[in-house]
């Protein structure tokens, strides 16, 4: 056990810290009556700036525009971004899920074609897995692709696609062999969202916004060259993405949570209850300390997972504990925040007196999605039960 | 950066596990816990022969000179085996208060047992609340919840001489010393009330040196305790998963039912998370990082809730069997409950964290 950084890692950290001090913009937060799209363009600009300075894709191979460093540097990068209170990068799914899957399963040509533009935020990605009748049971996908010469013809309907409204490309899983068993006849294919026959419809979510969309594919022609991995072996590739989703999403999430935590602590000095600042209330102090404890334990779990992945190469089913941890922590934390902030915490964006322009009421509602997206808590517990603990499959 | 035990540390843990599987199986734990002091001198000496009694004591003071991670790895295995008796009190609580090789030598060799008497009637872990008085080489006052005091050759006592904090050493047979057994939940770790009435005592440290020694001892003891807790909860998880695979109802292993499976999954999450917290605390203490104190409080708070909840689920998954004396889970559950309050309960540690985190920002 050794958590010290090597000389190069320290040099990397110091250089990055200096660069961020000079370049990081003010937090790009909700509010100011800015639309989702306007905020997104700011984040895209910020990612481009990071990319131009060589900070995007820290652990990605140099040949595809990355920095060629290790996962440890990637974690240092995220920690420094947090310390500098820098905004996150725009291409969340490209960087966290789909890029790593392309690195693992892609052909040389695919890597050269797609990876650099993920890093530069020129091409934003969305993930097209879920369907109206294939959610937790994602292998029961019905959207299909039929071979026609050197193209697949894609028809189908996907739902809940985060960033669907802004995406240039979609990592799509479709059925290519209807006769094969459920997990056997699937193919993972990369689809240009500008192709004729692709239609994106926003879905209005619990908070009133539309951060995800549904996608309709009608006779969309996709080159066979865009298949990631092998035809009819898409399940394996999709699992790769899901493992990354569980294992890596947490790293950037830790940072966001820590920032919310610090902000909440700051607010407890201003909010008064029972004749004193709530930061002096013993119960509030207990709750904040509990939230801090969980946040720390999550950070350490994450560090341990990264250390394991950097020695074994692939995230394993243990990643499920990270997914359960961050999603359920965030629900508890936002509830604590609501208790502390009182009625002001419920005011929404644009309302007079809203704290942080409604970030807390949004945050509270948004957490309900945390235990659903990226595999529900129940599915994660099934994974631990069966694949980690060796209990019989429950279904 | 590497967040796993090194190869030598893994070997140490593996050897400890094998040793305890042979020397301290659960039947042996049950036998020892039925004895008046729940301590077995032969087992203690065998553990000392492994070098464990002086694991983190410098070689020049008679120990093995290893670090906090090795200490945690060893106590994790002892917690897993539910090692009964005075080993914890001697090695994790009393020894870190000492630095004289004449005192430490016999402890490292396993020839002498010791304990520390710290908290008093109101069971508060804040040293400012302790009021046992030292005066002219004698102590007067009462200490509560002192582990394994009946087995200790000497008791180290936190007391004040006209307000100046000190650590004092009281021999087992000193006049005016009364040791009264309490009957507490944990059958494997006995607790005592210890009273001093003009009891002769040797001064070990006073003033700043005493405060330093106390701080160090409380940190090492908290680390050892949380490591034990991590080991104990991992064992409860294993016992429970094994049962869930074997026990059938409705012609089905109960572990196939999601309600059961999800309890086991939660147990796994808590158990693994505790390990991460404990080994980070060990690392922070080993490197004397500024966040060491907070890391220990985080580990203690998390482990306390985790161990209890794992016990709750473990018993539930065993059904009626889980409610019996015969089933081993309750032995761990009892340890979990007592560990929860030992060295500061969660209200205490969360307040420490609030001071470090909420008041600092
Ligand atoms: C904010 C958000 C963003 C998302 N982004 C994307 C995206 O970008 N791309 C994408 O493809 N998808 C995305 N999703 C979809 C998400 O992956 C699915 O919603 C999720 O997998 C659950 O599927 P479902 O909605 O069909 O619910 P269902 O599968 O119908 O589940 C309903 C309930 O039944 C439970 N359940 C189902 N099966 C089992 C079982 N075997 N054992 C125990 N309980 C079970 C579930 O846990 C849940 O509580 C997103 C979802 C949300 C909320």
Image (cartoon, rainbow, N blue to C red):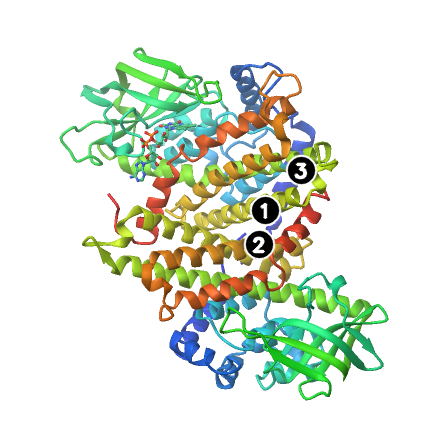
Disc 1 with disc 2 on a shared chain: no
Q: How many marks?
A: 3
Instruction: Rate crowding at label 3 as few (under 14), some (14 to 19) or many (20 or more) other CA atoms within 10 Å.
Output: many
Are the two marked residues, 3 and 2, in contact with CB atoms closer than 8 angstroms? no
Report the residue at 55% width, 76% height from top.
B87
Q: Which residue is mark 2?
A: B301
Whole-Å distance between the Cαs marked 3 and 1?
13 Å
Residue A241, how many percent across, how many down? 37, 35
Question: Badge 2: how crowded within 10 Å, few (<14), some, or many (20+)?
Answer: many
Name the chain under label 1: A
Residue linked to disc 1: A290
Q: Nearer the viewer, residue A167 or A67?
A: A167
Above or below, A344 relative to B191: above
Q: Are marks 3 and 1 in contact (CB under 8 Å)?
A: no
The answer to whether the residues at label 1 and label 2 have Cβ atoms under 8 Å apart is yes
Quick check: which quadrant has ligand 1? top left
Q: Residue at x 65, y 63 (%)?
A: B219
Q: Nearer the viewer, residue A89 or B74?
A: B74
Q: Is residue A380 left or right of residue A334?
A: left
Q: Quick one: label 3 or label 1, which is nearer the N terminus?
A: 3
Say what secondary structure mark 3 lies in: helix
Vertical order, A58 against B85 (above or below) = above
* Residue B204 visible in the snapshot: yes
Disc 3 target residue: A265
Tag on residue B243? Answer: none
Q: Residue at position x 28%, y 29% from top?
A: A134
The quarter of the displayed image where residue A373 is located: top left
């Amino acid at each position: 056990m050794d958590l010290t950084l090597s000389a190069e890692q320290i040099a990397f950290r110091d250089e990055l810290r200096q660069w961020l001090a000079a370049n990081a913009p003010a937090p790009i937060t909700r509010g100011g009556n800015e639309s989702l799209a306007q905020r997104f363009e700011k984040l895209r600009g910020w990612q481009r700036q990071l990319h131009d300075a060589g900070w995007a894709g820290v652990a990605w191979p140099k040949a595809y525009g990355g920095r060629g460093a290790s996962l440890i540097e990637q974690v240092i990068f995220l920690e420094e971004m947090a310390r500098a209170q820098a905004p996150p990068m725009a291409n969340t799914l490209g960087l966290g899920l789909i890029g790593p899957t392309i690195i693992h399963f892609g052909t040389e040509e695919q890597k050269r074609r797609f990876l650099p533009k993920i890093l530069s935020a020129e091409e934003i990605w969305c993930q097209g897995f879920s369907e109206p009748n294939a959610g937790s049971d994602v292998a029961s996908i019905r959207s299909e692709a039929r071979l026609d010469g050197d193209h697949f013809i894609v028809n189908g309907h996907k739902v809940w696609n985060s960033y669907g409204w802004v995406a240039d490309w979609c990592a799509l899983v479709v059925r290519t062999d209807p006769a094969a068993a459920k997990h056997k006849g699937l193919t993972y294919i990369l689809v240009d969202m500008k192709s004729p026959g692709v239609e994106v419809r926003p879905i209005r979510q619990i908070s009133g916004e539309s951060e995800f969309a549904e996608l309709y594919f009608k006779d969309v022609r996709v080159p066979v060259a865009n298949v990631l991995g092998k035809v009819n072996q898409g399940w394996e590739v999709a699992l790769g993405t899901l493992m990354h989703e569980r294992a890596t999403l947490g790293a950037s999430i830790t940072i966001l949570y820590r920032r919310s935590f610090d902000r909440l602590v700051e607010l407890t000095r201003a909010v008064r209850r029972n004749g004193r600042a709530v930061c002096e209330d013993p119960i509030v102090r207990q709750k904040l300390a509990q939230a801090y404890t969980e946040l720390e334990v999550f950070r350490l779990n994450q560090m341990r997972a990264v250390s394991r992945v950097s020695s074994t190469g692939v995230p394993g089913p243990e990643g499920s504990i990270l997914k359960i941890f961050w999603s359920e922590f965030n629900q508890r934390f936002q509830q604590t925040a609501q208790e502390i902030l009182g009625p002001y915490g419920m005011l929404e964006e644009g309302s007079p007196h809203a704290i942080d322009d409604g970030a807390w009421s949004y945050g509270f509602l948004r957490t309900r999605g945390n235990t659903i997206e990226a595999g529900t808590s129940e599915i994660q517990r099934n994974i631990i039960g069966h694949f980690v603990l060796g209990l019989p499959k429950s279904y | 950066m590497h967040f796993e035990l090194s190869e030598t540390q893994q070997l140490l843990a593996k050897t400890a596990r094998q040793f305890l599987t042979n020397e301290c199986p659960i039947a042996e734990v049950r036998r020892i816990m039925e004895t008046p002091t729940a301590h077995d001198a032969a087992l203690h000496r065998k553990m000392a022969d492994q070098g464990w009694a002086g694991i983190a004591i410098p070689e020049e003071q008679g120990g093995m000179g290893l670090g906090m991670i090795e200490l945690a790895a060893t106590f994790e295995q002892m917690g897993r085996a539910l090692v009964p008796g005075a080993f914890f009190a001697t090695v994790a609580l009393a020894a870190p208060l000492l630095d004289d090789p004449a005192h430490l030598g016999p402890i490292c060799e396993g020839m002498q047992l010791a304990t520390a008497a710290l908290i008093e009637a109101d069971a508060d872990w804040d040293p400012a609340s302790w009021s046992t008085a030292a005066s002219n080489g004698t102590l007067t006052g009462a200490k509560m919840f002192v582990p394994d005091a009946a087995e200790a050759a000497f008791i180290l006592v936190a007391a004040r001489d006209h307000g100046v904090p000190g650590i004092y050493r009281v021999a087992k047979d000193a006049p005016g010393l009364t040791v009264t057994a309490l009957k507490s939940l944990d059958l494997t770790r006995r607790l005592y009330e210890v009273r001093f009435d003009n009891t002769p005592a040797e001064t070990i440290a006073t003033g700043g040196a005493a405060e330093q020694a106390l701080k160090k001892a409380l940190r090492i003891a908290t680390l050892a305790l949380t490591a034990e807790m991590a080991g104990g909860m991992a064992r409860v998880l294993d016992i429970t998963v094994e049962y869930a695979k074997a026990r059938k109802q409705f012609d089905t292993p109960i572990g196939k039912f999601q309600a059961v499976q999800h309890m086991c999954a939660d147990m796994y999450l808590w158990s693994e998370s505790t390990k991460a917290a404990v080994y980070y605390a060990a690392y922070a203490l080993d490197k004397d990082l500024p966040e060491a104190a907070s890391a220990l409080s985080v580990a203690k708070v998390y482990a306390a809730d985790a161990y209890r909840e794992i016990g709750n689920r473990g018993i539930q998954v065993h059904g009626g069997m889980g409610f019996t004396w015969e089933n081993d889970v309750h032995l761990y559950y009892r340890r979990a409950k007592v560990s929860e309050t030992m060295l500061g309960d969660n209200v205490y540690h969360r307040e420490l964290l609030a001071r470090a985190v909420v008041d600092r920002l």
